[in-house]
Amino acid sequence: MKKISLLVAAALMVPSAFAHQAGDILVRGGAIMVSPTTDSNDTLDVQPNTQLGLTLSYMITDNWGVELLAATPFSHSVEMGGSEVAKVKHLPPSLMAQYYFGNAQSKVRPYVGAGINYTTFFDEEAKGTLAAAGSPVELDDSWGIAAQAGLDMKINENWFVNGSVWYMDIDTDVKTDLGTFKTSIDPIGLMVGLGYRF
């Protein structure tokens, strides 16, 4: 009986790993809202949209990881002077290098990341005055920097709650028969969801 008590006590003293240790694969999913922050000098204004976001992370060490962001296609209304002139869809996959604060036993793991974003636009559709003028709309794809900050909080040994904020540098040329408009979309993305550790 004495030996069993000692074994139980020893087991309780050994810290149990939560997640985010070398070799772990972390999958996060949830709602992600992309809110463009178009420059005040831009002629066009791009409206926000919310979609399903998904991230896949691999922990290289207990504190360093890499992450790929994916999502269902975002659909944005493009306005000029307060009136809709186009509808566009885009996908903004981003690859990040991440640093996680704390250690593998921490129940809460804040993290920051930096990397590169590629945004591809498709299904551009003229609306309003552009549609009336019979003008097509085309947006160039974009490469830019990306940054993030986030927080994971343990639910149990495999599940955790996640919240994160993203910034993406997205600059594009909007081409129409009425001219080409340079637009800096530079959206802020807010994601809230659940994560699972493999």
Image: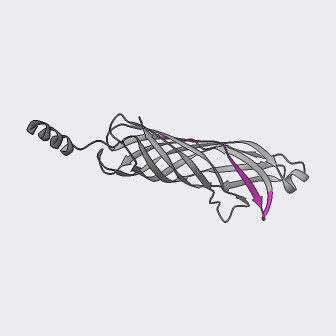
- Write down the region rendered in magenta: 68-84
Percent position (x, y) of residue 113? 44, 49
Query: Residue at the location (58% across, 50% down)?
Result: 32
Occupied quadrant, residue 36:
bottom right
Image position of 185 with respect to 12: above or below: below
Q: For the C terminus, which image quadrant?
A: top left
Percent position (x, y) of residue 51? 63, 48
Residue 192 inside the magenta-drawn segment: no
Query: Residue at the location (83% across, 45% down)?
Result: 136
Percent position (x, y) of residue 153? 40, 51
Query: Residue at the location (90% across, 48% down)?
Result: 134
* Nearer-the-camera pick, 93 or 74: 74
* Nearer-the-camera pick, 95 or 178: 95
Q: Main secondary structure of the magenta part?
A: strand
Q: For the N terminus, which image quadrant?
A: top left
Image position of 8 with respect to 81: above or below: above
Query: Residue at the location (74% across, 54% down)?
Result: 77
Left or right of 173, for residue 13: left
Left or right of 20, for residue 168: right
Is residue 74 visible in the rendered image? The answer is yes
Is residue 186 visible in the rendered image? The answer is no
- Count up the numbered dots: 0
* Nearer-the-camera pick, 17 or 58: 17
Occupied quadrant, residue 73:
top right
